[in-house]
Amino acid sequence: MNLFSPLLFPVRLENKKIIVLDETKLPFVEDYIEIDSLDKALWVLESMKTRSFGQVLIFFYSCVMFSDSFPLDYITDEFVRRRPTFDFPKLSNILRGGLKEGKNLEEVVNEFIERFDLLRKKRAKELAKILPLSANILTICNVNGELIYLYQALKECGKEAVFFISETRPYLQGTRLTFWELSRNSIPCKLLCDNQVAYLLLKGEINCIVSGADRANLRGDIINKIGTYALARLAKYFRIPLYVFTCYPSDIDIKNIIIEERPEEEVFMFIPKKQIFIDSIYPSFDIVEAEYITKKLEISKYQ
Amino acid sequence: MNLFSPLLFPVRLENKKIIVLDETKLPFVEDYIEIDSLDKALWVLESMKTRSFGQVLIFFYSCVMFSDSFPLDYITDEFVRRRPTFDFPKLSNILRGGLKEGKNLEEVVNEFIERFDLLRKKRAKELAKILPLSANILTICNVNGELIYLYQALKECGKEAVFFISETRPYLQGTRLTFWELSRNSIPCKLLCDNQVAYLLLKGEINCIVSGADRANLRGDIINKIGTYALARLAKYFRIPLYVFTCYPSDIDIKNIIIEERPEEEVFMFIPKKQIFIDSIYPSFDIVEAEYITKKLEISKYQ
């Protein structure tokens, strides 16, 4: 099998420019944005042209590209201002650690990415061993190609899998990213609306849930896309295991992390003439406490 | 206060034609469809141009208009074929009851509608008495203007209210119908995505839930728009009361009612170029057992 998703590496550094896959145009157009200034990098971040692992990459490459002009602390603060829920200070510490060892920023970043990809594959293999022989996997939002690694690992264990993808309103990352990357690799998958999840769980059509996480702490709590908390509560009730791919955990009480409130207009994305609406609510992340999570697959645990 | 929603009477009989408010075009255009054949009535039903109380009205008026050409049983069966979860046989029995009393169909229907509207107002008043002084009401889908009666009744009791409207994917009845009818009457309301409901409940921002029901049985179970079951489960966990406006209950085990599966394309409504997607799941109703419901406001209990 030779499976691939452009979302595995949604941001690249090429000829002194940061090249970003514009995820907001997916799945209709596979378009790339060139970044040659910090301002533009911050705009790309804020407007969610890239997210999740793309946020790691755009931050790292911005540090590589613009740390001659701006201090690392300044770049970090500006990134945090745009997307407060994501742990950019942690990433900044990783860079500083590398610098202390005498490497330059580009070396640190390249080593990080290479190792990260290796570890993603390892944890996909570990999860594949645990999942049922015929896995009906519910997922939410998008984990940047890791479900493709998971599917490959499942097949290598002789297991079957179907992915049930919750569309993930309002940005529809489930529909636009996960459904797109799985179906273009001919991986069996079905799309559903977020409010149909409980029905599938009740009917016994799902035997495991796999999600990513935007933040994790040492206690095992995570923060992930809005909708994840409801999913976790329902999963616990129906005794369906919830597996979460997490990154480097922070030593912080999860309740002290700022939950980003995004612009109201986004609630009306994909609805024509959205300007007639004015009042909505839009918290964009959910906190999920450790007790709801069957197993965290913490990336740094894979060496 | 003089509040009104066209959804209170979405279907009318005028000059020997059935006039149907096209709910699929709301909130952008207030357009009406003229029906002069049973075929067209069935098409309007199947394509969800009208729903909920509109289904009652289009069925009744079709019987008035077309029972010279088709037996009542035939009309009823054809309606059931289009939307199997709705209780058309019950409506048919109501008509038969009136005929037995010597009334003609049009009289029976007109009396039914007049009485139904009176009872809707009465139950809104009863619910208003129970709700908190400052009611933060979560709602799903659309209950054909009854929230307007509820708001009016709340104000008459000297109570305040804000409605939090779950958008209700995939058809977005919450956004397109409920948000529209409340905001055009300047009733305080906020829209949210279905997957954000648990977050609001967790934060304590909701103190009651009000929904309608497509079906109800004598035990107190209901069937309503997909998403209602998840809402009910979460409400129970967070101890938030759930009030349901129900119609005439059937003497049936709720599990024996057919849950309509609607066309997959509808999952992709409001997403451009939907034709690139092929595989989705779309159960369109949820069963909610009696134990999740704090109080059913059954229309026939109001005399």
Image: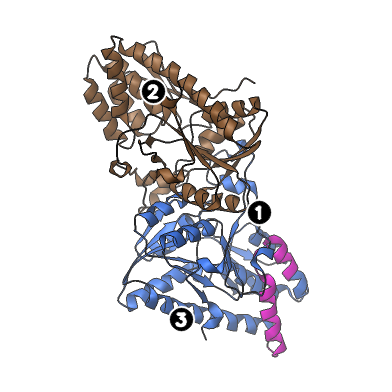
Chain colours: A blue, B brown
SS label for mark 2: helix
Q: Tag 2: residue type?
A: Leu
Q: Quadrant of the N terminus of chain B?
A: top right
Q: Earlier in the sequence, mark 1 or mark 3?
A: 3
Disc 1: which chain? A
Q: Main secondary structure of the magenta part?
A: helix
Q: Tag 1: residue type?
A: Glu
- Label ID, residue A261: 1
- Label ID, residue B57: 2
The Cα atoms of the two marked residues, 2 and 1, are separated by: 42 Å
Q: Nearer the viewer, residue A10 or B65?
A: B65
Image quarter of residue B129? top right
User: Is residue A2 visible in the rendered structure shown here?
Assistant: no
Mark 3 burial class by Cα count in 10 Å: few <14, some 14-19, many 20+: some
SS label for mark 1: loop
Q: Position of residue B41 (x, y in %)?
A: 33, 25
Stretch of the chain drawn in magenta: A76-103
